[in-house]
Image (cartoon, helix red, strand yellow):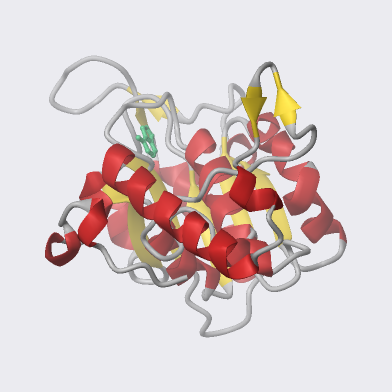
Amino acid sequence: MRIDVVTIFPDYLAPLDLSLIGRARRSGLIDLAVHDLRDFTTDRHRTVDDTPYGGGAGMVMRPEPWGRALDHVLASGGPGVRPRLLVPSPGGRRFDQAMARELAAEPWLVFACGRYEGIDERVQVEAAERFDVTLVSLGDYVLNGGEVAVLAVTEAVGRLLPGVVGNAESLVEESHEDGLLEYPVYTKPPSWRGLDVPPVLVSGDHTRIATWRHRQRLERTAARRPDLLAPASAAPVEDLEIVP
Ligand code: ADE
Protein backbone atom coordinates (compact mmCIF):
# COMPACT_ATOMS: atom_id res chain seq x y z
CA MET A 1 0.00 0.00 0.00
CA ARG A 2 1.07 3.51 -0.72
CA ILE A 3 0.43 6.27 1.84
CA ASP A 4 1.17 10.00 1.50
CA VAL A 5 0.74 12.44 4.37
CA VAL A 6 0.67 16.22 3.90
CA THR A 7 1.22 18.18 7.11
CA ILE A 8 2.91 21.27 8.51
CA PHE A 9 4.44 19.03 11.23
CA PRO A 10 6.31 16.20 9.45
CA ASP A 11 8.09 15.35 12.75
CA TYR A 12 4.73 14.46 14.26
CA LEU A 13 4.71 11.37 12.03
CA ALA A 14 8.09 10.09 13.27
CA PRO A 15 6.48 7.20 15.21
CA LEU A 16 5.58 5.65 11.86
CA ASP A 17 9.26 4.63 11.66
CA LEU A 18 8.83 2.41 14.73
CA SER A 19 7.53 -1.05 15.54
CA LEU A 20 5.44 -3.05 13.06
CA ILE A 21 4.60 -0.14 10.75
CA GLY A 22 8.27 0.91 10.64
CA ARG A 23 9.27 -2.65 9.79
CA ALA A 24 6.55 -2.86 7.11
CA ARG A 25 7.93 0.32 5.56
CA ARG A 26 11.48 -0.99 5.55
CA SER A 27 10.38 -4.27 3.98
CA GLY A 28 8.41 -2.42 1.27
CA LEU A 29 4.93 -3.56 2.35
CA ILE A 30 4.01 0.06 3.03
CA ASP A 31 5.41 2.87 0.88
CA LEU A 32 4.84 5.92 3.09
CA ALA A 33 5.96 9.47 2.33
CA VAL A 34 5.47 12.56 4.48
CA HIS A 35 5.29 15.95 2.74
CA ASP A 36 5.74 19.35 4.39
CA LEU A 37 2.91 21.64 3.30
CA ARG A 38 5.25 24.63 3.70
CA ASP A 39 7.35 23.30 0.80
CA PHE A 40 4.38 24.23 -1.41
CA THR A 41 4.24 27.87 -0.34
CA THR A 42 5.78 30.64 -2.48
CA ASP A 43 6.34 33.48 0.00
CA ARG A 44 9.39 34.17 2.14
CA HIS A 45 7.55 33.33 5.36
CA ARG A 46 6.17 30.03 4.01
CA THR A 47 2.68 31.13 5.02
CA VAL A 48 -0.05 28.47 5.09
CA ASP A 49 -2.88 30.30 6.87
CA ASP A 50 -4.89 33.50 6.89
CA THR A 51 -7.85 35.10 8.66
CA PRO A 52 -11.32 33.66 7.98
CA TYR A 53 -13.69 35.42 5.57
CA GLY A 54 -16.75 36.48 7.51
CA GLY A 55 -14.72 36.99 10.67
CA GLY A 56 -14.40 34.79 13.69
CA ALA A 57 -11.67 33.32 15.83
CA GLY A 58 -8.53 31.61 14.63
CA MET A 59 -6.93 31.12 11.25
CA VAL A 60 -7.85 29.06 8.18
CA MET A 61 -5.43 27.16 5.94
CA ARG A 62 -5.12 28.85 2.56
CA PRO A 63 -6.05 26.77 -0.49
CA GLU A 64 -3.05 27.44 -2.76
CA PRO A 65 -0.37 25.41 -0.90
CA TRP A 66 -2.88 22.57 -0.50
CA GLY A 67 -3.70 22.59 -4.20
CA ARG A 68 -0.02 22.45 -5.13
CA ALA A 69 0.78 19.76 -2.55
CA LEU A 70 -2.06 17.52 -3.73
CA ASP A 71 -1.07 18.09 -7.39
CA HIS A 72 2.47 17.03 -6.48
CA VAL A 73 1.34 13.86 -4.69
CA LEU A 74 -1.03 12.93 -7.51
CA ALA A 75 1.59 13.51 -10.20
CA SER A 76 3.75 10.78 -8.67
CA GLY A 77 1.06 8.15 -9.31
CA GLY A 78 0.14 6.50 -12.55
CA PRO A 79 -2.30 8.09 -15.02
CA GLY A 80 -5.96 7.63 -14.13
CA VAL A 81 -5.27 6.51 -10.56
CA ARG A 82 -7.73 7.97 -8.02
CA PRO A 83 -6.29 7.82 -4.52
CA ARG A 84 -8.48 7.93 -1.43
CA LEU A 85 -8.02 11.36 0.17
CA LEU A 86 -8.62 11.23 3.93
CA VAL A 87 -9.15 14.52 5.69
CA PRO A 88 -9.08 14.09 9.49
CA SER A 89 -11.81 16.22 11.02
CA PRO A 90 -13.99 16.01 14.13
CA GLY A 91 -16.97 16.31 11.78
CA GLY A 92 -15.94 13.32 9.64
CA ARG A 93 -17.08 9.71 9.46
CA ARG A 94 -16.31 7.95 12.72
CA PHE A 95 -13.30 5.66 12.23
CA ASP A 96 -13.85 2.05 13.28
CA GLN A 97 -12.60 -1.44 12.48
CA ALA A 98 -14.96 -1.78 9.50
CA MET A 99 -13.53 1.41 8.01
CA ALA A 100 -10.00 0.15 8.73
CA ARG A 101 -10.80 -2.99 6.71
CA GLU A 102 -12.29 -0.86 3.93
CA LEU A 103 -9.18 1.33 3.77
CA ALA A 104 -6.86 -1.70 3.91
CA ALA A 105 -8.30 -2.75 0.54
CA GLU A 106 -7.26 0.56 -1.07
CA PRO A 107 -3.99 0.76 -3.02
CA TRP A 108 -3.29 4.38 -2.14
CA LEU A 109 -4.24 6.61 0.79
CA VAL A 110 -3.45 10.33 0.98
CA PHE A 111 -3.93 12.18 4.27
CA ALA A 112 -4.43 15.96 4.41
CA CYS A 113 -3.74 17.16 7.95
CA GLY A 114 -5.52 20.38 8.79
CA ARG A 115 -4.49 22.67 11.64
CA TYR A 116 -5.95 25.86 13.07
CA GLU A 117 -9.67 26.24 12.30
CA GLY A 118 -9.37 23.93 9.31
CA ILE A 119 -8.62 23.97 5.58
CA ASP A 120 -10.38 26.34 3.15
CA GLU A 121 -13.50 24.42 2.07
CA ARG A 122 -12.66 24.77 -1.63
CA VAL A 123 -9.69 22.39 -1.24
CA GLN A 124 -11.85 19.32 -0.69
CA VAL A 125 -14.37 20.44 -3.33
CA GLU A 126 -11.63 20.78 -5.94
CA ALA A 127 -9.85 17.62 -4.76
CA ALA A 128 -13.03 15.58 -5.24
CA GLU A 129 -12.46 15.82 -9.00
CA ARG A 130 -9.26 13.81 -8.65
CA PHE A 131 -9.53 11.92 -5.33
CA ASP A 132 -12.19 9.95 -3.50
CA VAL A 133 -12.49 12.30 -0.54
CA THR A 134 -13.53 11.09 2.93
CA LEU A 135 -13.55 13.18 6.09
CA VAL A 136 -12.58 10.91 8.97
CA SER A 137 -12.97 11.43 12.72
CA LEU A 138 -11.29 9.53 15.51
CA GLY A 139 -14.16 10.28 17.87
CA ASP A 140 -16.35 12.96 19.35
CA TYR A 141 -13.62 15.19 20.72
CA VAL A 142 -11.40 17.87 19.22
CA LEU A 143 -7.69 17.40 18.52
CA ASN A 144 -5.33 20.19 17.53
CA GLY A 145 -4.86 18.77 14.05
CA GLY A 146 -5.05 15.68 11.90
CA GLU A 147 -1.65 14.18 12.67
CA VAL A 148 -2.73 12.03 15.63
CA ALA A 149 -5.58 10.69 13.49
CA VAL A 150 -3.06 9.76 10.77
CA LEU A 151 -1.03 7.80 13.33
CA ALA A 152 -4.11 5.94 14.55
CA VAL A 153 -5.60 5.22 11.12
CA THR A 154 -2.26 4.18 9.61
CA GLU A 155 -1.58 1.77 12.45
CA ALA A 156 -5.09 0.26 12.40
CA VAL A 157 -5.05 -0.09 8.59
CA GLY A 158 -1.39 -1.09 8.25
CA ARG A 159 -1.68 -4.01 10.64
CA LEU A 160 -4.45 -5.49 8.45
CA LEU A 161 -2.16 -5.67 5.40
CA PRO A 162 -0.88 -9.18 4.68
CA GLY A 163 2.55 -9.71 6.22
CA VAL A 164 2.55 -6.70 8.55
CA VAL A 165 1.51 -8.57 11.70
CA GLY A 166 3.61 -11.74 12.01
CA ASN A 167 0.95 -14.02 13.49
CA ALA A 168 -2.13 -13.60 11.29
CA GLU A 169 -4.16 -15.60 13.83
CA SER A 170 -3.74 -12.82 16.36
CA LEU A 171 -5.84 -10.60 14.08
CA VAL A 172 -8.82 -12.95 14.18
CA GLU A 173 -9.87 -12.92 17.82
CA GLU A 174 -9.24 -9.27 18.47
CA SER A 175 -11.65 -6.77 19.89
CA HIS A 176 -13.96 -5.38 17.20
CA GLU A 177 -12.93 -7.87 14.50
CA ASP A 178 -16.15 -9.84 15.00
CA GLY A 179 -18.10 -7.36 17.11
CA LEU A 180 -17.00 -8.70 20.51
CA LEU A 181 -14.30 -7.49 22.86
CA GLU A 182 -11.28 -9.69 23.56
CA TYR A 183 -11.13 -12.28 26.33
CA PRO A 184 -8.72 -11.59 29.24
CA VAL A 185 -5.19 -12.94 28.84
CA TYR A 186 -2.69 -14.22 31.43
CA THR A 187 0.92 -15.36 31.45
CA LYS A 188 3.40 -16.60 34.07
CA PRO A 189 3.58 -16.66 37.05
CA PRO A 190 0.45 -18.74 37.82
CA SER A 191 -0.07 -16.78 41.05
CA TRP A 192 0.81 -13.09 41.49
CA ARG A 193 0.05 -10.88 44.49
CA GLY A 194 -2.62 -13.33 45.61
CA LEU A 195 -4.29 -13.45 42.19
CA ASP A 196 -4.41 -16.82 40.41
CA VAL A 197 -4.69 -17.53 36.72
CA PRO A 198 -8.19 -19.00 36.08
CA PRO A 199 -7.76 -22.79 36.53
CA VAL A 200 -9.47 -23.60 33.21
CA LEU A 201 -6.52 -22.03 31.37
CA VAL A 202 -4.07 -24.52 32.88
CA SER A 203 -6.44 -27.50 32.50
CA GLY A 204 -5.15 -28.45 29.06
CA ASP A 205 -8.78 -28.96 27.96
CA HIS A 206 -8.93 -26.93 24.76
CA THR A 207 -12.68 -27.24 24.28
CA ARG A 208 -13.33 -25.90 27.79
CA ILE A 209 -10.77 -23.13 27.25
CA ALA A 210 -12.45 -22.05 23.99
CA THR A 211 -15.89 -22.08 25.65
CA TRP A 212 -14.60 -20.09 28.65
CA ARG A 213 -12.94 -17.54 26.41
CA HIS A 214 -16.01 -17.07 24.28
CA ARG A 215 -18.16 -16.60 27.37
CA GLN A 216 -15.68 -14.03 28.70
CA ARG A 217 -15.94 -12.12 25.43
CA LEU A 218 -19.74 -12.06 25.64
CA GLU A 219 -19.74 -11.01 29.30
CA ARG A 220 -17.16 -8.28 28.77
CA THR A 221 -18.95 -6.90 25.76
CA ALA A 222 -22.29 -6.90 27.60
CA ALA A 223 -20.70 -5.18 30.64
CA ARG A 224 -18.41 -2.67 28.94
CA ARG A 225 -19.83 -2.08 25.48
CA PRO A 226 -23.47 -3.22 25.35
CA ASP A 227 -23.89 -0.99 22.30
CA LEU A 228 -21.80 -3.48 20.31
CA LEU A 229 -24.27 -6.30 20.83
CA ALA A 230 -26.90 -6.35 18.09
CA PRO A 231 -30.43 -5.56 19.34
CA ALA A 232 -31.48 -9.11 18.49
CA SER A 233 -28.86 -10.52 20.84
CA ALA A 234 -29.17 -7.87 23.55
CA ALA A 235 -30.47 -10.63 25.81
CA PRO A 236 -28.91 -11.43 29.21
CA VAL A 237 -25.51 -13.06 28.74
CA GLU A 238 -26.92 -16.34 30.16
CA ASP A 239 -29.26 -16.59 27.16
CA LEU A 240 -26.59 -16.04 24.53
CA GLU A 241 -25.47 -19.04 22.57
CA ILE A 242 -21.91 -20.15 23.29
CA VAL A 243 -20.14 -20.90 20.02
CA PRO A 244 -16.48 -21.62 20.71
N1 ADE B 1 -8.91 16.81 13.99
C1 ADE B 1 -9.39 17.48 15.03
N2 ADE B 1 -10.16 16.70 15.79
C2 ADE B 1 -10.19 15.48 15.18
C3 ADE B 1 -10.82 14.26 15.47
N3 ADE B 1 -11.61 14.09 16.53
N4 ADE B 1 -10.63 13.23 14.62
C4 ADE B 1 -9.86 13.39 13.54
N5 ADE B 1 -9.24 14.52 13.22
C5 ADE B 1 -9.39 15.57 14.04
For the question of whether residue 160 can be seen, the reply is: no
Which residue is at 53% across, 36% downward?
147
Q: Position of residue 13 (x, y in %)?
A: 66, 37
Q: Which of 162/216 is in front? A: 216
Image position of 124 with respect to 208: above or below: above
Which residue is at 29% across, 21% downward?
51
Q: Is residue 113 left or right of residue 39?
A: left
Image position of 176 with respect to 113: above or below: below
Q: Position of residue 89 (x, y in %)?
A: 34, 41
Image-quarter location of ligand 1: top left
Q: Is residue 128 left or right of residue 91?
A: right
For the question of whether residue 92 can be seen, the reply is: yes
Q: Residue furthest bottom?
A: 80
Which residue is at 38% across, 24% downward?
116
Please state, as top left, top right, bottom left or bottom right, where the N terminus lies in the image: bottom right
Q: Is residue 160 left or right of residue 164?
A: left
Q: Position of residue 243 (x, y in %)?
A: 40, 72
Image position of 179 with respect to 12: above or below: below
Q: Which of 179/222 is in front? A: 222
Which residue is at 68% across, 55% downward?
203
Image position of 149 with respect to 24: above or below: above
